[in-house]
Structures are given as C-alpha cells and as structure tokens.
Image (cartoon, helix red, strand yellow):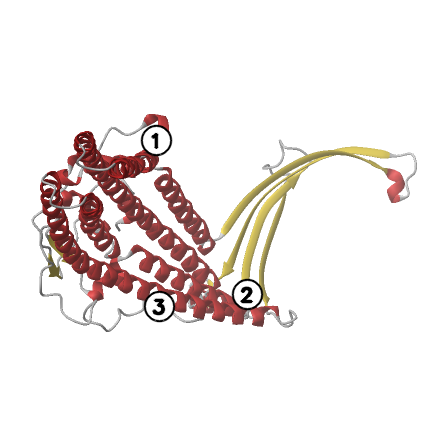
Amino acid sequence: MTFHKISGVPATMAALLFLAGCAVGPDFQAPPPPDVTGFTPEPLTKPTGAADTVGGAAQYFNAGQDIPGQWWALFHAPALDRLVTQALAANPDIKAAQAALRQARELALAQGGAYYPSVDASFSTSRQRTSGAQQGQSGTSSIYSVATSSLSVSYDLDVFGATQRSVESAEAEAEYQRFQLEATALTLSSNVVNAALQDASLRGQIEATREIIEAQSEQLDVVRRQFTLGGVSQADVLAQESTLAQTRATLPPLEKQLALQRNLLTALAGRFPSQEVAETFSLASIDLPQDLPVSLPSQLVRNRPDVQAAEATLHQANAQLGVAIANQFPKFTLSAGWGSAADGVDGLFGSAASGLWSLSAGITQPIFHGGTLEHQRRAAEAGLDKSAAQYQSTVLSAFRDVADALRALQADAETLKAQLAAERSAGASLELSRRQFAAGAISYLTLLNAERTYQQSRISLVLAQAARYTDTVALFQALGGGWWNRTDDTANDTLRK
C-alpha cells in the first residue's frame, strides 16, 4: 500500500489524528434554573412580628441580597465565632471531605494521562547454557550471555472520544467531591450554631425552672404556716409539696440534655468529651439578625452545594453515556519500538549490537459481544435519566427548604409574641392569686392552677425565643450558607476556582 505523505505523516495517520478528540454522545449542558420568581406564593414585603423580649426583634427580608461567607458572625457572638472556626479546622468530617476531593482530583489527572502516548523502557540480561543435542550435536554445549534493551511507544487514538468522555467523567466526580466538601462545611457550621443555641435554650429553661422551684418553695412555707394557723388543710400542704416535687423532677432531665449538648458541641469541635469546650451560651448574649438576605430563586441552584453536587453527578452520567457509545465504535492503536541486543552488557550499545525496531498500527472493531456493549449503552442512558430525576428532586427540596424556613420565621415570630403575652398574663395572674390566697379570697386549688400555668408559659417562652434563632439558621443553611463569599481557607482554597 502506498501512503501519500503530508509533512512526513502518512495521510491515513493524519486523518486519524484529525479525528481524535471528536467525542460521540451528548455534550453536557447545565440545566437552566427553574422558571419561578419567588419562594412563596406572595411577595415577602412585610417584616416579621416583634416582641419586647430576647429574640423578639422584627426581621426584614431583603430579596436579592447576598449572604456573607461567615454568616454566623451576624449573631454577634464572639464565643460562637470561635467555636465555628475551631470546628471547621479540627472536625474529622471536614478532613475526610478534603481528602476525598484531593483523591478525586488526582484520579482525574491520572485519567487525563490517556491523552498522551505511553513510553516504556526495558532492559534484560541473561546467561544461558544450551545443549548441542538440541541441534543434533550430541556431546557439545555452549554458554553465552544475552543483553537486550528497548524503548516502546504506544498511543490509542481517541477517534470517537472514549478517552475524552472518561476524563470528563473523572473531572465531574472531582466537581462532585468539591461540592460535597462545601455541603459538609455548611452542615457542620449549621450544626455548631444550632447546638450552641440549644445550649443557650437549655440553660434558659434550667434557670427558669430553678426560679420556679424557689418561688414554689417559698409558697410551700406560706402554706405550712397557714396550716399551722388552721387556715388551710393538710391536703393543701400535700398538694403544694407534690407540685414542688414535680417541678424539681423536671430539672434533672434538663441538666442531662445540657450535658449531652455539651458533648455534642465538644465532638463537633473535634475534641473528646473529657476535653470539653470552654464556650457557654445564653440567648441574651446572642443577637438575632434583623436584616435577612434572601437570594433570588435563579441563584439558589448555583448557591446550594447539594444542587451543584447533583449537577456534577448528572454531568458524570452524561459523560458515561458517551463512553458507552464510543465503546461500540472501532479503536485505533499506533505503536513503535526500538532496541538492541548483544552478547553482553558491555557490547549492548556498541557496533556489535544488533538493532531491533518495530512499527505497527491496529484497528479493532467490536462485532459480537453477546449484547454487552448495547446493554451497557442502554444502562448508561437509564443512569442519565436517573441522575436527571435526582437533580430535579434536589432542586425541589432546596426550594421547599427555603420556603419552610421563611414560613417558620413568620409563624414563630407571631408565636413568640403570643407566648410573651401569655407568660406575662400568667405571671400577673399568679401574683394576684398569691395575694388573694393569702387574704383567704380564693381556694388553694385556684392558686395551684395559676402556678402550673405560669410554669408552663415560662418554659414555653424560652422555647419560643430559641425558635427565632434556629429558624434564622435554617434560612442561611437553606440558601447555601454563602460559601462563595468565604475568604478563609478553612474548608479548602481550591474550592473557589
């Protein structure tokens, strides 16, 4: 066969090189953002309700405003800032996610090596003794040495893009790990803030319970004195003692919850339980952010790490389909080798050495594989459909999370307002009942009911206060946490390309 040369390259080879890099299969296109203009049916134009108590400030929704990278700093609690920073630096989940990202990127680079020719060098030497009987010369033998060296080059032409799609898949996996790291950092920071808020809430409940116990103890002394004077019955004394005992019984479970919460905070910070963190919290020491940034719906799919991770998975499935299609097309291979052989290492590169060389080109066309390649292609198509559906599900969940947080912010603001009114009313009612009971104007049962109502309303007020803070955390988390604005290298500077 005669080859027409083009700049020293056979025309056929030049044509194959020209075709290399043309990938079969669909090119990936990022899904467009959902065609919606808001997270709720009505515009968020009104502030939340307000109450004159801790955590009772009105909050305003600022549509289109960006989220700061250190969103937890909006609570203006230095102890909280220290704890989140420590957790991001020491928590093993972050370190594991960072290692997974490094691994995925190195594997992508390793996969990219298929774009280049493979070059291998080899060397061997041996000393042998052969018998002349092998050539019909009985009684004779010879001893000789053989040394060989060679250099081989091989290259698989990526005519139909199997290599390109494989590299694309590996890079999409690295992108997935990138956003898994961001999701881990967001979840960790949110868990730390929520754990700190729960710490503060439990301390508030414990403080309120102790105040109630003290007040009920004082009331028990009053009832006992009245019993001595004949103003009340023994049943009234026993009822007050029972009420006090029941209130005291609620204190150990709260203290246990606080101890468990301290263990959680310590573990989130990457420490053992015996190395408990020093930071403690109270709701009064934490500011409730009043200006709440609310990203545009079109930006949410770019900001949420889980949505971006789902998009990377979709990209990977798309590339795998290209690989499956390319595997049904011919494969082209070029190889060349050069070397020498001699009767010893000393003569390997001398004039006495024998030169060795080879040039080859090959093509392999799949013909029959028992339907394997066709079914692999169909499986890849199904995998792409699955990833597309999972992406859509992730987007829907992201929008629902934001909508849930916005509804909770509005509803819990009203709840706190109502709970504050209930607590103040119950407190005033209890104070009046105590005076009336001391004057003999009401029965002890009426006083007892007033005490129980106040106790319940006091604890409910602390819970309602804490809910305002946790709702705010939920909104920041639902919107993606502002990782794209982060300037520290706690998670990994390589995340921001």
Residue that mark 2 sits on = 331
Mark closest to the chain's N terminus, 2 or 3? 2
In front of the other: 382 or 218: 218
Give the Cα separation between the discs numbered 2 and 3: 36 Å
Q: Position of residue 93 (x, y in %)?
A: 37, 41
Q: Position of residue 460 (x, y in %)?
A: 21, 48
Residue that mark 1 sits on = 271
> Against 410, is 448 above or below?
above
Residue that mark 3 sits on = 392
Q: Position of residue 400 (x, y in %)?
A: 28, 64
Give the Cα separation between the discs numbered 3 and 1: 38 Å
Q: Quadrant of the N terminus?
A: bottom right
Left or right position of 363 against 11: right
Left or right position of 261 against 5: left
Left or right position of 263 against 323: left
Which is in the foreground here, disc 2 or disc 3?
Answer: 3
Which is in the foreground here, disc 3 or disc 1?
Answer: 1
Question: Which numbered tag is attached to residue 438?
Answer: none
Element class at badge 2: strand
Q: Position of residue 125 (x, y in %)?
A: 66, 35
Question: Would you call the spot at circle 2 few (<14 residues within 10 Å), some (14-19), or many (20 or more)?
Answer: some
Question: Would you call the spot at circle 1 few (<14 residues within 10 Å), some (14-19), or many (20 or more)?
Answer: some
Element class at badge 1: loop
Q: Amino acid at mark 2?
A: Lys
In front of the other: 298 or 254: 254
Q: Quadrant of residue 487?
A: top left
Check the image and name the residue furthest to the top. Answer: 274
